[in-house]
Image: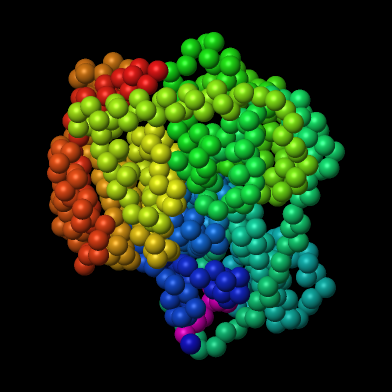
């Protein structure tokens, strides 16, 4: 087998292998050549070549999102590394294990005006679980050691012994740092950065390894639920007549059905879920804004919970956040093994456990003795809203709203839905989705910059068909995502093209002015047709309800190439249709 000659490169490749990191997403470069040679000449690894580093990082994130294991991205030195930052921040806030491997120049070549050179050490420090800055191998016995290395070896007088001792010390340090970074990414579920300096020559190879790195593990014991805190929760639960459970982003199958059933059958409990919660029960409230948006102050007071229990990642609905910040609960518990966001400025308990672990200890100790009509009142409201919703959808003109009502019903059972930010995920919130779907969206930072790349990474990682529903600005912003040789034939994109940033027409602003159209909505006449021709996507369009229904009849079926359906909606009425909706369902 071919290996890079540089011992440090061998160490990185072998430890990734020993840690079972199989997916390596590589962007081309010279400084990272030793690692590229090592990974691509070992059949253990699945290596992908993605030129655009921003797309590469989101592609890797999409794979990691699905397999729940670390995925590595590898780049050359310089600005290439900075293009990873949007995906790194998304991984940080979405708890996705991403390993950034960046090649770097030796320390003596940094800050002297060399090309493709920046200060790479700790460059992601505010959005990273751990940064490992590895040390350069000693090239030969004549190398002068760095000042901080000298005290360790004062007693060594022989030059060769001194050289070997220094190299062994550097090797040991690098192994320790790399082991720690890879372990933390896996067990703490987040991004880590490993910065790796290489000196020339970079392309030399050997047939045998000169290193034998050892796997080290970190003893990360799962936090046990504090029993006194659990008792306090039980006591507070018993006296409360209005409990609200609000679920943010969750991967599918995170909570056992028995606990969902238990919560759903408690008359004092409302379970609000979102499209990205991946939780379903007939008694849950999946379309939060349908309930919240039309309420007056008296109704808000009636909905105000005594206890708010939150779990999962970030919440999409701005309306539920505004409501709970104004009508604060007496108690707010957040259940999460890692972190607790004080989203509503009233957090009093962070229960450091997975939701499944907490409910398995908490709910068996609870009996439904509290008399309450909390659920019955709001369940009636939910049913009334749903009837008005159906009636409204039937009578509206073709628009974003109408298109989403048709598209979301068309998705095949047991497939994956990826949603773009910002309008796409918000429209999806208003509809009851097929419970067999797995739904994902980059809600860690809620950016539009990598939605398509993430969806493609997801499609590569899973055999299930993946469909991305996205808006035009999000799609065109990430159009380099299609510059990818690994897109499965069954991958589907549905592009809602309303000729600009339609969400800005919904937000407060001076719309229908030249300044608004140009700088906020950024209206355009772009289409995806030429991109589809370039990247070999089958391309179809729909301009009205009839064309959309016709296109969807064959859209998900087997094809020789991935497909894109571009749905054109009228730019100037979408906001009116949506805003009227909340008035009609009151």
Where's the C terminus, which quadrant?
top left
Q: Please tell me which residue is depicted at 65% across the width and 81% down the height of the picture.
A: 212
x and y percent of residue 88 in the render?
50, 49
Residue at position x 55%, y 62% in the image: 69
Would you identify the image quadrant in which residue 400 lies?
top left
Look at the image and give the residue range highlighted in magenta: 2-11
Q: Is residue 161 magenta?
A: no
Q: Is residue 194 left or right of residue 73?
A: right
x, y percent for residue 43: 46, 80
Find residue 529 and report its horizontal and vertical position in percent. Answer: 15, 50
The residue lying toward the viewer, choosing from 560 and 107, is: 560
Q: Does residue 352 show up?
A: no
Decide which of 381, 489 is in the foreground and name it.
Answer: 381
Instruction: Determine whether 157 is above or below 96 in the image.
Output: below
| Residue 510 visible in image | yes
The structure residue drawn at horizontal position 29% and vertical position 26%, both measured from the top left corner, is 392
Residue drawn at the location 32% of the way across and 45% of the way down:
409
Horizontal side of 364 relative to 204 (left or right) equals: right
């Amino acid at each position: 087998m071919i290996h890079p000659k540089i011992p440090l490169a061998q160490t990185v490749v072998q430890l990734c292998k020993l840690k079972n990191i199989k997916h390596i997403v590589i962007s081309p470069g010279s400084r990272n050549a030793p690692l590229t040679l090592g990974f691509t000449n070992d059949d253990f690894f699945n290596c992908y070549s993605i030129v655009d580093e921003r797309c590469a990082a989101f592609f890797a994130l999409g794979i990691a999102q699905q397999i729940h294991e670390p995925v590595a991205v590898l780049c050359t030195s310089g600005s290439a590394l900075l293009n990873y930052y949007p995906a790194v921040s998304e991984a940080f806030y979405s708890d996705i294990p991403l390993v950034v491997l960046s090649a770097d120049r030796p320390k003596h070549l940094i800050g002297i005006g060399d090309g493709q050179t920046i200060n790479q050490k700790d460059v992601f420090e505010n959005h990273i679980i751990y940064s490992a800055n590895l040390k350069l191998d000693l090239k030969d016995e004549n190398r002068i050691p760095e000042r901080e290395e000298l005290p360790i070896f004062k007693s060594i007088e022989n030059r060769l012994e001194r050289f070997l001792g220094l190299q062994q010390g550097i090797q040991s340090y690098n192994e320790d740092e790399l082991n720690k970074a890879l372990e933390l990414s896996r067990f703490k579920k987040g991004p880590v950065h490993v910065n790796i300096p290489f000196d020339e020559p970079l392309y030399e190879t050997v047939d045998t390894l000169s290193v034998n790195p050892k796997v080290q593990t970190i003893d990360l014991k799962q936090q046990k639920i504090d029993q006194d805190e659990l008792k306090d929760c039980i006591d507070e639960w018993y006296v409360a007549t209005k409990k609200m459970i609000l679920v943010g982003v969750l991967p599918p199958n995170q909570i056992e059905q028995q606990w969902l059933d238990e919560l759903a059958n408690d008359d004092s409990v409302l379970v609000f879920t979102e499209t990205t919660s991946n939780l379903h029960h007939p008694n849950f409230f999946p379309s939060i804004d349908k309930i919240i948006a039309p309420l007056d102050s008296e109704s808000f007071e009636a909905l105000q919970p005594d206890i708010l229990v939150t779990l999962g990642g970030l919440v999409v609905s701005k309306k539920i956040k505004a409501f709970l910040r104004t009508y604060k609960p007496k108690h707010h518990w957040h259940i999460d093994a890692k972190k607790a966001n004080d989203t509503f400025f009233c957090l009093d308990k962070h229960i450091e456990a997975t939701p499944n672990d907490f409910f398995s200890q908490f709910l068996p100790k609870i009996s439904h003795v509290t008399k309450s009509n909390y659920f019955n009142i709001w369940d009636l409201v939910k049913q009334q809203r749903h009837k008005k919703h159906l009636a409204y959808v039937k009578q509206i003109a073709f628009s974003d709203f109408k298109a989403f009502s048709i598209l979301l019903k068309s998705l095949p059972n047991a497939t994956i839905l990826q949603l773009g930010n910002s309008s796409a995920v918000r429209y999806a919130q208003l509809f009851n989705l097929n419970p067999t779907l797995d739904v994902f969206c980059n809600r860690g930072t809620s950016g539009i910059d990598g939605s398509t790349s993430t969806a493609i990474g997801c499609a590569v990682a899973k055999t299930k068909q993946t469909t991305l529903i996205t808006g035009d600005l999000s799609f065109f912003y990430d159009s380099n995502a299609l510059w990818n040789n690994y897109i499965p034939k069954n991958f589907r994109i549905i592009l809602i093209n309303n000729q600009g940033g339609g969400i800005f027409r919904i937000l407060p602003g001076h719309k229908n002015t030249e300044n608004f159209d140009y700088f906020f909505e950024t209206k355009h006449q772009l289409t995806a047709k030429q991109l589809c021709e370039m990247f070999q996507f089958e391309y179809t369009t729909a301009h009205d309800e009839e064309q959309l229904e016709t296109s969807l009849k064959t859209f998900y079926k087997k094809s020789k190439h991935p497909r894109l359906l571009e749905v054109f909606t009228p730019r100037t009425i979408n906001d009116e249709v949506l805003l009227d909706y909340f008035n009609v369902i009151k």
